[in-house]
């Protein structure tokens, strides 16, 4: 069964390696990446290798951007025959601005 998998922070490094591995297994991949060049290059590389991949520019620190990602994934499901998303992986690196207990959904 082909799965639709969204991987955030997958424009390079560990996230891209995960995307490659899952794509090689037949999964459809959404590269959700803040950096447009990284996103397009990563998805393009996967497509050149014969895999099903698309890039969606996403800043997961921004609530509106995450909502746009969800909308885009829904549209992919309808327009391109992709099934609903089965898996969301986050492969991000960064420094949090506070403890998990003190951090709100707005990042403060």
Image (cartoon, rainbow, N blue to C red):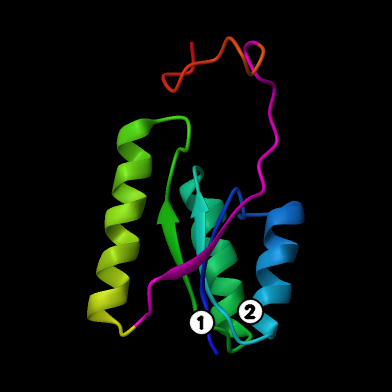
Describe residue 75's horizontal placement relative to residue 82 as left or right.
Answer: left
Based on the picture, tell me whether residue 8 belongs to the magenta stretch. Answer: no
The residue at 35%/63% (across/down) is: 73
What are the residue bounds of the magenta stretch?
82-98
On-image quarter of the N terminus: bottom right
Q: Residue at x 67, y 13 (%)?
A: 99
At label 1, counting other C-alpha atoms closer than 10 Å, the crowd grade (few under 14, some 14-19, many 20 or more) is some
CB under 8 Å between discs 2 and 1: yes
In the displayed structure, would residue 22 be above or below residue 102? below
Helix, strand or loop at mark 1: loop
Gap between marks 2 and 1 measured at Cα: 7 Å
Other residues around mark 2 within 10 Å, as few (<14) / some (14–19) / many (≥20): many
2 or 1: tag closer to the N-terminus: 2
For this view, does 62 lie left or right of residue 95?
A: left
User: Who is closer to the viewer here, 106 or 57?
Assistant: 106
- Residue sitting farthest toward the front: 101
Q: Tell me which corner region of the image, top left, top right, bottom left or bottom right, holds residue 83.
A: bottom left
Left or right for 90, reference 76: right
Q: Compared to 48, does 75 lie above or below? A: above
Q: Which percent across, then down, holds residue 71? A: 27, 55
Which residue position holds label 2? 23
Q: Position of residue 22 (x, y in %)?
A: 67, 75
In the picture shown, does residue 5 fall above or below 72?
Answer: below
- Residue 16 x %, y %: 68, 61
**Residue on which disc 1 sits:** 52
Q: Going 68% across and 85% down the picture, which residue do you hit?
A: 25
């Amino acid at each position: 069964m082909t799965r639709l998998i969204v991987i955030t922070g997958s424009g390079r490094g560990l996230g891209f390696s995960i995307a490659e591995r899952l794509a090689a297994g037949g999964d459809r991949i959404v590269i959700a990446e803040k950096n447009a060049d990284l996103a397009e290059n990563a998805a393009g590389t996967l497509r050149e290798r014969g895999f099903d991949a698309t890039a969606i520019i996403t800043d997961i620190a921004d609530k509106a951007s995450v909502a746009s990602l969800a909308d885009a994934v829904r549209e992919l499901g309808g327009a391109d025959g992709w099934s609903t998303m089965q898996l969301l992986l986050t492969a991000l690196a960064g420094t949090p601005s506070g403890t998990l207990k003190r951090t709100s959904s707005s990042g403060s």
